[in-house]
Image: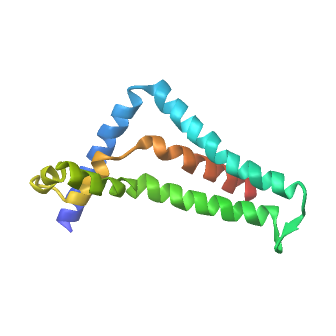
């Protein structure tokens, strides 16, 4: 249990450091989050456009489809936000930097998730949350 607490604290340190680094360039961070939010919002616009012509589609009305859309985007966004760094495991093995993770006194997963954490992935979560709140 003590080791798990240590790994969580270490991960949070990584996250704080990466977040501070991203927020050094606030305009770039804000523009990236806004762009990601707007691009993801275009999917919801398609649902609105589709349901402007029909009342139901396969027995589903607009609010049900928007809820399903928001729930799926929110779940994928949260998964990408928390564990999206796992996709960088293979490239680190290929370029040889994975060995550096193995020799450090911390868990490989903690280091991998912390090293490739990206606060800017919040855009999708924000957009899906706004759609979810609007539907409920």
Q: Position of residue 73 (x, y in %)?
A: 59, 57
Q: Is residue 9 visible from the viewing direction of this image?
A: no
From the viewer's side, name the closer residue of 114 and 50. Answer: 50
Whether residue 24 is visible: yes
Residue, x 38% and y 33% (percent of image)? 22
Q: What residue occupies the far front of the structure in this picture?
A: 94
* Quadrant in which the N terminus appears: bottom left
Rendered position, 26 above or below 102 = above
**Residue drawn at the location 52% of the way across and 55% of the way down:** 77
Q: How many marks?
A: 0
On screen, residue 5 versus residue 55, left or right, reads left
In the rendered image, residue 89, in percent from the top left (x then y), is placed at 28, 56
Quadrant where the C terminus lies? bottom right
Q: Residue furthest bottom?
A: 59
Residue 58 as seen in the image, left or right of residue 123:
right
In the rendering, at what x and y percent does residue 80 appear? 45, 55
Percent from the top left, x then y, of residue 6? 20, 57
User: In the figure, is residue 98 to the left or right of 14?
Assistant: left
* Residue lying at 58% horizontally and 36% vertically, measured from the top left: 35
Identify the residue shown where x is 52% and y is 35%: 32
In front of the other: 75 or 3: 75
Q: Nearer the viewer, residue 53 or 29?
A: 53
Q: What color scheme is it?
A: rainbow
């Amino acid at each position: 249990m003590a080791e798990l607490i240590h790994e969580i604290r270490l991960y949070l340190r990584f996250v704080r450091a990466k977040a501070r680094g991203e927020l050094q360039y606030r305009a770039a961070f804000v523009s990236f989050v806004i762009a990601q939010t707007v691009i993801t919002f275009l999917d919801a616009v398609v649902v609105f456009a589709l349901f402007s012509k029909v009342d139901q589609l396969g027995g589903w009305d607009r609010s049900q489809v928007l809820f399903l859309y928001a729930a799926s985007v929110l779940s994928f966004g949260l998964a990408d936000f928390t564990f999206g760094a796992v996709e960088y495991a293979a490239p680190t093995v290929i370029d040889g930097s994975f060995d550096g993770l193995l020799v450090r006194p911390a868990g490989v997963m903690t280091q991998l998730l912390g090293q490739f954490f990206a606060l800017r992935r919040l855009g999708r979560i924000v957009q899906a949350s706004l759609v979810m709140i609007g539907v409920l």
